Amino acid sequence: MMPFLSMIEAWKSPQEKLNKVIRWKKYLENARPQNSLQHSHSITILGIMVLSRIKSFVSLDEGLILSALTLHDVAEGEVGFDTLYIDKTNLSDEKEYFAFVKLYQKTSPDVFDYLHKAFLLQFAFKDPEDFPSSARVEITELRKTKRNEALCFEAIERLDYVFYAIEQATEKNNTKILIQTLRHQLSHLNKLNQELPGFETIWTEEISQWAQQLLSTYEGLWIETKESVF
């Protein structure tokens, strides 16, 4: 029997599938197309930059955070689509969780346990009720023992949304996507500024005020509606 076949399958699948999943689908008029493979790579780079800024303020398991960033959307390739932020539900999370497990459960137990833990970090503050009890126990443990890591993951993920939106506003003159993104993310980023040591050096009070002023300027315009995904 050829060696490493289960690991090769888990290693190969994201390469072949994530580039077929287009993100920001309903925002792509006058915006740069981005697929989930590009996103997974770029958010990990952003994670490295954020960690380099805050590591003197807080002790973190950087390996877990970077693993979580790399893996968090792998299941999108397995289900074949990305769920937009406004449309995320417990059901979409559940479908992605089981797709992740199906892909990686064939690896050895030690490999799977680490990948599983890293994948679940993104749910530390959600506690999805439809996940298996074993996964929910691990999520609870992550919330208790890796709280700052979960906060850091969340900060990077939300900052990544804003980075993409700022890029479109700057390079495509697409203010609409920036306004809609900031409406979702501003309050969360302001809260993370208070909870995650060092994040205030990135999401500064000056940037927060800039974002709030921008939202005030466009108040009432481009209001989004939630769509049914399933």
Image (spheres, rainbow, N blue to C red):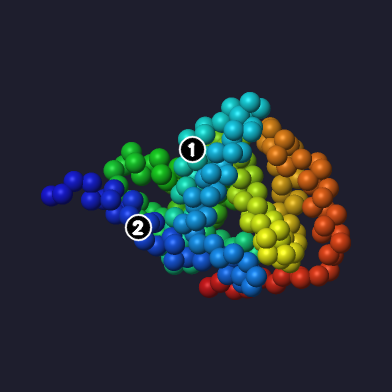
Mark seen at residue 64? 1
Q: Position of residue 8 (x, y in %)?
A: 28, 51
Q: Which residue is located at x 23 percent, y 46 percent?
A: 4
Q: Residue furthest left?
A: 1
Of the numbered discs 2 and 1, the one sitting upstream in the chain is 2
Q: Secondary structure at mark 1?
A: helix
**Which residue is rendered at x = 36% and y = 61% of the image?**
16
- Which residue is at a point 29% across and 54% down the rendered structure image? 9
Residue furthest out toward the front: 171
Q: Position of residue 128 (x, y in %)?
A: 55, 54
What x and y, as percent, mark residue 143?
A: 57, 39
Say which of 34 and 197 sits in front. Answer: 34
Q: Residues within 10 Å of mark 1 (few under 14, many from 20)?
A: many
Is residue 191 left or right of 25 when viewed as pictured? Answer: right
Asked if residue 132 is positioned above or below residue 67 in the image, the reply reads: below
What mark, if any, has residue 13 been given in the picture? 2
Label disc, if present, on residue 1 of the rendered structure = none
Figure disc tally: 2
Which amino acid is tagged 2? Ser
Vertical comparison of 100 with 207: above or below: below
Residue 172 shows up from this direction: yes
Which of labels 2 and 1 is toward the front? 2
Quarter assignment of residue 84: bottom right
| 31 on left or right of 136 | right
**Label 2 secondary element:** helix
Q: Residue drawn 66% across and 57% down?
A: 167
